[in-house]
Amino acid sequence: MRFLATFLTTAALVLPFNALAQETVKLTVASSHPTTIPWIGMIQTHFMKEAERILAVKGAYKIEWQEAFGGTLYKANATLTSVEEGVTDIGWVFSYLEGAKMPLSQVTAYTPFSTNNVPAQLLTMRELFNTVPEFKKEWEQYNLVFLGATGSDSYDIYTKKPVTKLEDLQGMKLSAPGTLGTWLRGTGANAVDGALTTFYTDIQTGVSDGVVSLALGALPAKLYEVAPYITRVDMGVVFSGGLAINKDSWDGLPEEVQQALLAAGDFYSKAHAEDLMTRHEVALKKIVELGASQNPPVTVTPLDPAERQRWVDQLPDLAGEWVAAGESRGLPAKSFLKAYMDGLRARGEKPARAWDETK
């Protein structure tokens, strides 16, 4: 009985002490886009929850999140600098709006029509991040620690008027995010720089006649209301950036929390890639359903394969230009391009154009 009493007394003392010993780590997590955009919403549902789950196993640390999604702290044109300068601890970095600062990250933007397989592309990019020092440095030089890659579902065009052949694009102004405007070269259309957060207003106010966009972004942004004609071009998927943490914030974290964030970032990236593949078609069907009663109603029309191939063939040597620009800056752009294309092929992809066969 004395032993039992001693045990219970000790347990009563130890259990509250252990509970009090749990350390709370405060982190701000933010984005330029709202959580209705799938890859942003998954920061909450997958990255944050997975980090919490991992830490809960040992119980030594827990994270208290300060959330600032939807442009509360910064807009789409300031994702890199905001994480770099510590405006937020963790944030989604929209790398393909940062062509000058992050040139190697743009490789997928200069190789359109290469793949619609998001998991294959993001696995390739993560492999390159771990094997090409210049690519890793491209992120780390801005005071960032890379946590997880993000991509897109396949790009199509959403317009005010029907598009059935390349000639219909002649003279059109189409909004496109950053370097993706290059995909319109040779088509007769004019690219207008923009992002999902500006597309609706761009079309509504006549700044553009349509957009180069993706179903999972167009659905929550309601682009179909102002651009009801969707032409399925299947232009391909892109590496859009990634989740990163400010290096100063990172250095102040216990190793256990760091490892949890890395694991959560990997989990987030893989789940995000699979999610894009399964939800792309669902999103298009939902757009048609929601736009059925508007005037004119939403229509989705696949671009004729011959017209699509004309588009591919008429594009200038985008990858070759990208390589030349990169090599002039001392970057291994040519070998990086080949490694990217070979990575896709190794994962079963068959690019519509061999962009690595540059002159």
Image (spheres, rainbow, N blue to C red):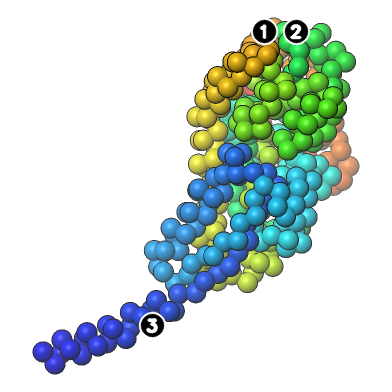
- Position of residue 164 measured from the top left corner of the image (x, y, whole percent): 72, 8
Q: Residue at x 39, y 63 (%)?
A: 57
The crowding category of the residue bearing disc 3, from other C-alpha atoms within 10 Å (few below 14, some 14 to 19, many at least 20), is few
Nearer the camera: disc 3 or disc 1: 3
Question: Which sits earlier in the primary sequence, circle 2 or circle 1?
Answer: 2
Amino acid type of the residue tagged 2 in the rendering:
Lys
Mark 1: which secondary structure? loop
- Position of residue 109 measured from the top left corner of the image (x, y, whole percent): 74, 33
Question: Which sits earlier in the primary sequence, circle 3 or circle 2?
Answer: 3
Q: Which residue is mark 1?
A: 304
Write down the quadrant of residue 248 in the picture: bottom right
The crowding category of the residue bearing disc 1, from other C-alpha atoms within 10 Å (few below 14, some 14 to 19, many at least 20), is some
Q: Nearer the viewer, residue 167 or 206?
A: 206
The vertical placement of 358 against 270, above or below, is above
Q: Residue at x 38, y 79 (%)?
A: 18
Q: Which residue is mark 3?
A: 17
- Position of residue 110 measured from the top left corner of the image (x, y, whole percent): 76, 31
- Total count of labels: 3
Mark 2: which secondary structure? loop
Q: Which residue is mark 2?
A: 165
Question: Which sits earlier in the primary sequence, circle 3 or circle 1?
Answer: 3
Write down the quadrant of residue 244 in the picture: bottom right
The vertical placement of 139 against 175, above or below, is below
Separation of marks 3 and 2 at Cα, in angstroms: 71 Å
Separation of marks 2 and 1 at Cα, in angstroms: 8 Å
Amino acid type of the residue tagged 1 in the rendering:
Asp
